[in-house]
Image (cartoon, helix red, strand yellow):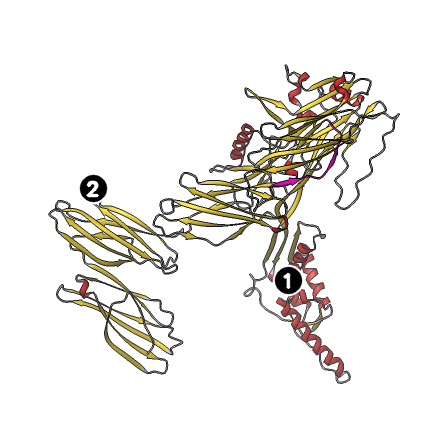
Amino acid sequence: MLLLDSKTIEIDGITIFPDHADPLQFYYMPLAPHLTTVSAGQGAASPQFSLIRFKGAAGTGGFLNFDVNLGIAPDRLDHLKQRLQQQTGLNDPIRLGPLSVVDGTVRLIMLDAEDPPPRTPGTPAPTPAPVVADGLHFVEKISHAAKPSLYGDNQAAFSVKLTQEGVDIIEKSLGGQIQPIAVIYALDYLGLRPAYSVRLAIDWDRTQKHMDESFGVDTMFVSSDISSAVDKLIENRTIKLEVDSFVTDDDTTVAGRRDAAIAQVKAMMTDAFFTPSLPPWTPAAPSQWSQDLQKVGDVIGMIAAGPAASVMNKSLFSYKKTDYTRTDRKSLNVNLSERVTVKRSIFPQGHLAGMFEMFQQPGFDRSRFVIDVDLDNPWFKRRHLGVSTLIDFDSDHIGAINLRASYGTQPKNLILTKAAASGAFEWTSQLDGNTMKMPLDVSYDVTFTGVDATERPRSLTSAKRIELGEALVIDPRELYTISTVPVVATEMPWDTYPQVEVHLRYSDPANNLAETEVLRLDKVTQQGTWAMFVLDTTKRSFDYKLIYRAANHMDHETQWQTEDDGTVTVSDPFPRKRQVTIIAALTWADIDRCFIDLSYKDGVTGSTQDKSLELIEGDHSKSVTFELSDPTNQRVDYSGLILYKDGRTVDIPPSTTLSPRILIRADMKGHRLVQVVPPDLAAAHLVKITADLRYEDFATNLSFAESYIFEPGTPPKVFEYDYADPNRAQFEMRSSYVFDNGMQKQRDWQPMDQAVVALKAP
């Protein structure tokens, strides 16, 4: 999450925020918006701006249309990364992304008019000030969406109807240093910041001396006397109690936790030097003594409950003298702090002087953007509305936008598609006196294509609105949001899991949304994205699960889990590994090759991982890796076959190892591991178990013996031995038991063949 602290920096008019957890992640936000440009071919950029001046018998005036955004060009973003890399001194490449906003508005201030501040939902819209017919004014109407796009570059489109005087001022100001037009964004974002810090440091020598001089051991005091003494110690800096609050007291939740922390620290100081006391019994007032006794009991309960129970202000205490130069010195040196997530606002803004620098460049043809219209031409005797959209039809799966516009009693519609993303309406004009009526009733339908109607709507309909301008930019994302969910694989063992299936789902029953998607990642395609369709922007959580397709067909599937961060990271499901290296110490002049089979049984999942390899001259050392669910289980079983050049074969007996290496020899014997597990000695009333294990094969001159003593808390032991004949691989064990009552019991030698021997109480 974005971190609000002193590491926030500004580079070339761009504010950069760090991330609270990832030192390589940063977020940027320009301090001022700029004019939107589109490609005009051959590397040229064309600004989204037009000033239409009209005159004629019907009237005079103009329309100013322009788009602004807060994006950064790719080349400038690369330069910004280099500057940031230099300033931070980080070695690894940094990641720089736009600041994610949760809400916001955009306003326009132009000449003698401005947008009203955003109103609170549920309150009536303010009544616009009446235009005085004989008064001088420059702006007649400002039209634009109250909110920017709130995604990507935060695009905002403006359409302003100007009077003749307003057109003249705007046209003349294009060549000046500043224009009387300002765009002001107000964007809300979430960030992490400190809430409070409580620090306590005590000079114990001075504090104890002051307490000894101020209070007697046999004297009782009320809590107000103690508070006065503590306050005096704080005043003369003997006790340093420092409280930093980074939030206002209006934030009752954080302020309450801060006050509780302060109260806890003060209660700890009181409890360190004082204890609740009972006043002497007075024969003349026995009832008062009973009341005091009850009061002391309440005080003891208050201290046990902590500072939250400190509600009495005249409790009786006595001084307890303790030498704190030796004890408890560290327990009251306290430092408590907290960080909270807060919503903050940022206000990128700028005048047209900062956005229209390209208009002042030598050789720039302004006539392409400043258009003169003669209204006496018959063409202008018609109501015209130009319509366009900047939406990406493919990425949003939009088939068509059906735009409906009514001028008086004359309804018309226009279909916008990817091939025809703009169009125009025309009507015979309707006049009000000598002025053409401008209001149009506009609404539109968005029809989606290539979507599953069982998961999301096939179409959405906008609310009807009144349009007074002659240019309208349709943004279908006023009706919905596409949340892009990146799915990225990091440090994946692709040889073990050649493919990973990422199953995603999003549910919003209130809006009939039940979306599902499956992405498949492999060594070549290690990342993907899911375009999640959202109608309620307050509900962005989704679920996902991972299915790891294993090369040995032992697939691993995770449980469904909810993600609020908007990112799915795919990593190794078993980051703990067990690697075994096999080295063949053979005489290759006689031996052709060697085959080794290895096996690992997972005691947690019950699955078995099998590996096979072939060793030859020149390639006589190889390693295999097993995935561990239980890192304490390191047992690997193996066997093999040695093939001689004359056709003879020699078997390597089934063996077990805990070693990271296996040395293969022609005279290799089998190797076994036997784990001896003791019972719960305390539950069986045992104080000691002695287990003797032995293996003897006098025909091959093999003899192994071990003796293990188990007492409460002794871990399991491992008995290892070699054998030559698989038919004579059994071992023997005897055991003796000592009970807590002094009795003893023995069990004689018994043959055994299991890999794990669980000792049982007799």
Side of 700 where 580 appears, left or right? right
Which quadrant of the structure image shows residue 27? top right
Mark 2 residue type: Gly
Labelled disc at residue 514: none
Side of 578 where 185 appears, left or right? right
Q: Secondary structure at mark 1?
A: helix
- Residue 108 in view in this figure: no
Labelled disc at residue 618: 2
Mark 1 residue type: Gln
Side of 685 where 33 appears, left or right? right
Q: Find residue 725 and report its horizontal and vertical position in percent.
A: 17, 62
Q: Which residues are magenta?
A: 458-469
Instruction: Choose between 487 and 340: the one closer to the eye.
Output: 487
Q: Find residue 756 and report its horizontal and vertical position in percent.
A: 30, 66
The vertical placement of 335 against 114, above or below, is below
Which quadrant of the structure image shows residue 149? top right
Q: Find residue 478 and report its horizontal and vertical position in percent.
A: 66, 38
Residue that lies at the very extreme toward the right in this rendered image? 134
The vertical placement of 355 against 489, above or below, is above
Instruction: Choose between 547 and 5: the one closer to the eye.
Output: 547
Q: Indicate whether residue 116 is drawn in magenta.
A: no
Side of 210 where 139 appears, left or right? right
Which residue is drawn at the image coordinates 20% and 41% (left, top)? 618
Q: Find residue 639 and report its horizontal and vertical position in percent.
A: 23, 55
Q: Indicate whether residue 463 is drawn in magenta.
A: yes
Which quadrant of the structure image shows residue 316? bottom right
- Residue 660 in view in this figure: yes
Which of the two marks, 2 or 1, is nearer to us in this view? 2
Labelled disc at residue 264: 1
Mark 2 Cα-neighbour bin, 10 Å: few <14, some 14–19, many ≥20: few
